[in-house]
Image (tube, rainbow, N blue to C red):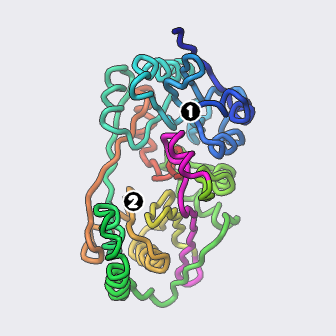
Amino acid sequence: MAQHLRIIKINELNSFVASDFFQQLGNIPISPLRAMSQSVNPNAHPEDPVLIIATEENELLAYAGVLPEKIQHSSKTKVAWNSCWWGHPQKGRGATMKVLYKALQLWDKQLLFDELPQRSKQVLELVGGFLFKDYPGAHCFLRFKFKKIVARKYPSKGFLDPVLGILDACLNGLNNLRLRSSVSNGVRVEEIKGLDQESAEFIFSHQSKELVGRSLESMRWVLENPWLANDQSNQADLKKRYHFSSCAEKFEHNILKVYQTGNLIALLWISLRDGTAKTPYVFIDDGYDEIAFIALLNFLVEKNADTLITFQPDLVKMVKMNGSKFLKVKPISKTFGFPDGMKDLIEQYPVVQDGDGDVVFT
């Protein structure tokens, strides 16, 4: 049987997911919400190729997706983030590499890769033309979860749920008292729903060393165009058909502005997905790391967050200094891959925020 390679552009995404071809697929190469969001990506051109699929007799064998990006310090550099790469476990052999090679060809190898799995890194090393940089992080455990752990490992022990629930509540109540810290005099924390002019100006003043330097327009696009569905009715079907993040019981963006004696000293963008908190964007004035960290920790206690995952250098430093605050801290790292032609640019602008690429959406 002949394999067919198809390229989907930005301006074709919505019609593609609405097509009869898409509807009859078993596995799908993009979720409807992702398609809607990417179709209005302010960093993309309508003709940008963003999805490459390989099929055989209307069966999906493999796909690769990219997310067009703008580099703030190099307007001539047209790049995209790798957003997904999948091959059918039995039938995708060969097609999996074809879609990746086609994506690399279409984008002249100007692709960025964040949180690269080791296997994908090895593939890129074989392809050649890419360099890699590791970023250290921290996975912090904030709450007891005996009920969830036992339910996951021992499904037949459901009769223990009431007892374990009470145990978790008691332990976490005591632990919250330990976690919560009082803020210094003159410190005020304000949660905002969107990004106002003061926030935009503060963010811009901290982006001089960022590679991407996401614009206000791009940040608002993220906030207004989610990728994760909260609708419980079709989650099981979507998870079965699409092999990347598409659903959550609860996903939200939270933005905190931290003031000291009336002056904005920090802005913390926190995402919270089913109990796991991440820090997509963090901007802190020099010398105020501790105040920002306390504001973050108090917010996580208020939201009953189970864990915190961060690669933000200022926050990782504070986690190391305050390790006893957490039930457990696990050192982690992520690998960032980039074209070797961008080496000088990366050295000059080394800051890659946790939310750059598509990570902020999930």
* Front residue of 349 and 162: 162
Please give the residue where the numbered disc 1 appears in the rendered image.
26
Question: Which residue type carries mark 1?
Answer: Gly
Q: How crowded is mark 1: few (under 14 residues within 10 Å), some or many (20 or more)?
A: some
Question: Which residue type carries mark 2?
Answer: Thr
Tag 1 secondary structure: loop
The earlier-in-sequence mark between 2 and 1 is: 1
Region rendered in magenta: 234-263
Q: Residue at the spot x=42%, y=88% of the render?
A: 182
Q: Residue at the spot x=53%, y=57% of the render?
A: 248
Q: Where is residue 179 in the image (x, y as percent from the top left)?
A: 35, 82
Q: Is residue 74 magenta?
A: no
* Front residue of 292 and 277: 277
Residue 61 lies, with reference to residue 139, above or below; the image says above
Q: Which numbered marker is on residue 310?
A: 2
Q: Is residue 240 magenta?
A: yes
Tag 2 secondary structure: strand
Q: Position of residue 221 (x, y in %)?
A: 67, 51
In the displayed structure image, the side of residue 80 where residue 98 appears, left or right: left
Q: Residues within 10 Å of mark 2 (few under 14, many from 20)?
A: many
Asked if residue 173 shows in the view, the reply is yes
* Front residue of 215 and 262: 215
Q: Residue at the spot x=39%, y=65% of the render?
A: 308
Q: Position of residue 331 (x, y in %)?
A: 26, 58
Q: Residue at the spot x=34%, y=25% of the render?
A: 123
Asked if residue 42 shows in the view, the reply is no
Q: Position of residue 268 (x, y in %)?
A: 52, 66
Q: Which numbered marker is on residue 240?
A: none
In the displayed structure image, the side of residue 291 where residue 159 appears, left or right: left
